[in-house]
Amino acid sequence: MKRDIRRAIFGIVGALLAAVAAAVADNLLRTVPPDVDGPPLAPVDSERTVTQIPGFRVETRERTFNVDFWNDHCSGPRNINWRIDADSEWQIQVESIRPTAYPDSDSTFHGLADVSSDGFTLRGRLVNGGEGCGPFRIWRDSRGHMRIRGTYIEERTVPAGVAPSSVGDTGRG
């Protein structure tokens, strides 16, 4: 009888400890994933050049982007459709877009879509990998993850006598 009571107590204590460990793990590992269909990403200038045309000035700048996507714990597959738009009065040189994706083993980068001089969309699919949601989830974060980095070139033509700040320069370069 005492042996059965002891086993029952150990079982209950073990279950409680497992529940507490799982809750602690969820709180430690929980990060808020970005809105996958969120607002346009604000790229960063890395270089700027100016070319003179009689009466006009053509400005070009290389832009870089770096974005991470995470799936929620215990969730199903999720599609990524992340739009990057050219700044006002700037145009993207379509042939200059160079994304590099780093998906985990279960997620997939599908490439670019809706590509034009006004912008483009990064597309992919996040898939969680494995059984991180069971009683041992504290040991493994199996959320789907993908990092996408890349560069592209924007250009604009402005009258030679006009200061850049008066024609839509965002001040980021």
Image: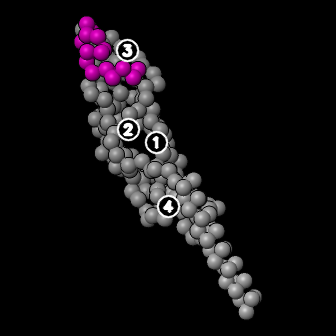
Circle nearer the N terminus (2, 3): 2
Residue to which mark 1 is pinned:
67
Circle nearer the N terminus (2, 1): 2
Quadrant assignment, res 19: bottom right
Compare residues 6 and 103 and report the one nearer the observer: 6
Residue 109 x %, y % = 45, 52
Residue to which mark 4 is pinned:
73
Q: Which range is magenta?
A: 158-173
Say whether residue 142 is left or right of residue 162: right
Distance Cα–Cα, label 2 vs label 1:
8 Å
Amino acid tagged 3: Val
Residue that appears at 35% across and 35% down: 94
As drawn, 35 above or below 85: below
Residue 5 x %, y % = 70, 86
Badge 3 density bin: few <14, some 14–19, many ≥20, Cα 10 Å: few
The circle on residue 50 is 3
- Tell me if I can see residue 28 in this picture: yes
Circle nearer the N terminus (4, 1): 1
Distance Cα–Cα, label 3 vs label 4:
48 Å
Residue that appears at 46% across and 25% down: 46
The circle on residue 41 is 2
**In front: mark 1 or mark 3?**
1
Compare residues 40 and 34 and report the one nearer the observer: 34
Q: Label 1's element?
A: strand
Determine contact: label 1, label 3, CB under 8 Å: no
